[in-house]
Amino acid sequence: GINRWDIRRGKMTDDVTAGFREAARIGELLPLQIEDGTPVTLGRFRSALRQFMRRRPCVLAVVDNVTRMVDSSGIANKDAAYSQIWNELDNASKVTGVPIVALSHLLSGAAHEQRRPRRDDIPFLGGRYADQAFLVYRPELSMAPAPPDRIVAANGMPEAEEAWARKVNQWHNRKAETRNVTEIIPAKQREDDGQYHPEMVKLIYDRDTSRFVDPSAQPASPLIGSMDEEI
């Protein structure tokens, strides 16, 4: 993998350049098409999918961010916009026979309440249209960004130092336990044949290369560059 921190800092070493060339070479061999133009509309997505299928078989289509598609829809009512797009994506998958993976940010309730996300957190009934729904949860991101402050009562008396230190230690321990931990949580399974029951999977988020890896597996490729500090 190529270290994204080096790229952001402009550290284009010979190794990084060689890594880009190798990634480009591999990418050209893959049956992959990326539509990154704007605006990201439902019509543009359907057109790109049809064009790709005329050239080669398509086994999977991915919508990177449904929210951007909603923002480009021109429909003022967000409920109506999301409902239409979820429904149209469902129809496009049935007509073409191509599975569509639609990625979306969750509603902010889970983060504010510092809890695991639920299917209801998928924006505007997205979980109703999907055959399968999975939630990506990083516990450390739902934590308070800093250790708790010492509470001062109305009479001006601070809480006991021992109690405050215990809460601070709990925060640090939780932060260490959850650092880079990612949970893939199955939220919906429409077709139940009695054999396939997806379970929660834990992965590790690789900050350097922005990818998720199996904690028990070795990296697929050596990391080019290193992260001296976070930006």
Image (cartoon, rainbow, N blue to C red):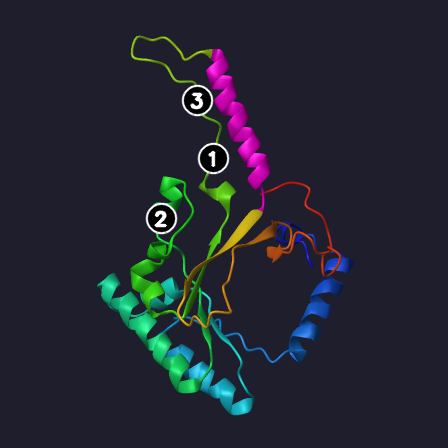
Q: Residues within 10 Å of mark 1 (few under 14, many from 20)?
A: few
Q: Where 110 sits versus 50, above or below? A: above
Q: Position of residue 231 (x, y in %)?
A: 58, 43
**Quadrant housing the N terminus:** bottom right
Q: Is residue 90 magenta?
A: no
Residue under the image location 35 percent in, 54 percent down: 121
Give the mark nearer the N terminus: 2 vs 1. 2
Q: Which secondary structure type mostly characterizes the magenta part of the structure?
A: helix
Mark number, residue 145: 1
The secondary element bearing badge 1 is classed as loop
Closer-to-camera residue (147/126): 126
Give the mark nearer the N terminus: 3 vs 2. 2
Closer-to-camera residue (105/118): 118
- According to the picture, the residue beneath numbered tag 3 turns out to be 149
Left or right, residue 170 beside residue 226? left
The secondary element bearing badge 2 is classed as loop
Q: Residues within 10 Å of mark 2 (few under 14, many from 20)?
A: few
| Residue type beneath disc 1 | Pro
- According to the picture, the residue beneath numbered tag 2 turns out to be 108
Q: Quadrant of residue 89?
A: bottom left
Left or right, residue 34 beside residue 75? right
Q: Position of residue 70 (x, y in %)?
A: 33, 66
For this orientation, the residue located farthest to the front is 194
Residue segment shown in magenta: 161-180
Q: Where 179 sits versus 149, above or below? A: below
Q: Where 168 sits versus 162, above or below? A: below
